[in-house]
Image (cartoon, grey):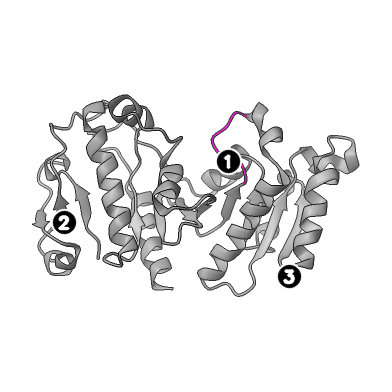
Amino acid sequence: MFFLIGDPSHLPAGTPVVEILAPEAAADAMGEGLPVLARDFGGPRVPGAAQPGHAPHVIDAIREAVALVQAGRAAALCTNPIHKKALKDGAGFAFPGHTEFLAHLAGVDDVAMMLACDALRVVPATIHIALEDVPKALTRERLETTIRITDAGLKAQGLARPRLAVAGLNPHAGEGGAMGRAEIEMIAPLLDDLRADGLEIAGPLPADTMFHPEARARYDVAICMYHDQALIPIKTLDFAHGVNVTLGLGFVRTSPDHGTAFDIAGTGKADPSSLIAALRMAREMAGR
């Protein structure tokens, strides 16, 4: 079972709602409607339009949800998409995205963003930065941290010895230095050190041959060097059911793998599959 933290008036008309005063009441309410810890967001929703006036309340709801999970009053956190510009305009939101804010609330310096579906798990070592900035941001320390967080996160999910596949930065993984030297000078030496430390790692591998079915059968997660190298394969394989999982927080957090989709808000065209998958994955991960 699950419950929502938010303004009940912002739900679609006709949604059966049961307002609850505490998470512990959600189980009994579930049979009658959606349990909601009701919070007044200070104004009506306008489908398809950013509303900066709601920003402080959205941020407070995220804070409250994290506090409930950390206190053991909820088993996991499943977040809905946020509109980052509206939060910045309305409340001075100082974080690049949801993940960075959650890391701040959890009191951790480093987390990893994993996108998962039945066919594939991927983790980008660099996330929401321009492609031209990736080589500078992709330090040995950053890549090692991402790999170690990913390995620990999969072990926490029940994989005793996760098989990690690491992509190269350059086409053909640099092709022996002909197309770049990041693989020779940094990535390969790091992976050798991590193997010596007991991690099961393949790579650096050419990204263009990592995602066909036979290749995917040889690893549990693909660690990629930048955003699109990781997200294009998974969104191509299963756009509707991808789930965003944050590793390294100290609690379970999942989210749909899509944005706010203002262009179809309120039209009845939105596909709930990714949110349903995120809720189910949160339950499964919390159960482990």
**In this rendering, position of residue 29 left or right of residue 54:** left
Task: Report the residue marked by disc 2.
Answer: 34
Residue at the image point whose x is 66% and y is 36% from the top: 137
Q: CA distance from mark 3 to mark 2?
A: 46 Å
Residue at the image point whose x is 32% and y is 48% from the top: 272
Task: Report the residue marked by disc 1.
Answer: 232
Task: Report the residue marked by disc 3.
Answer: 198
**In this rendering, position of residue 31 left or right of residue 226:** left
Q: CA distance from mark 3 to mark 1?
A: 30 Å
Residue type at mark 1 is Ile
**Position of residue 194 measured from the top left corner of the image (x, y, whole percent):** 75, 61
**Position of residue 242 measured from the top left corner of the image (x, y, whole percent):** 46, 50
Q: Which residues are magenta?
A: 125-130
Q: Earlier in the sequence, mark 1 or mark 2?
A: 2
Between tags 3 and 1, which lies in front? Answer: 3
Whether residues under marks 1 and 2 lie with C-beta atoms below 8 angstroms apart, the answer is no
Residue type at mark 3 is Gly
Looking at the image, residue 2 lies above or below residue 260: below
**Under tag 3, what secondary structure?**
loop
**In this rendering, position of residue 144 left or right of residue 90:** right
In the image, 10 versus 232, the foreground residue is: 10
**Position of residue 201 measured from the top left corner of the image (x, y, whole percent):** 73, 62
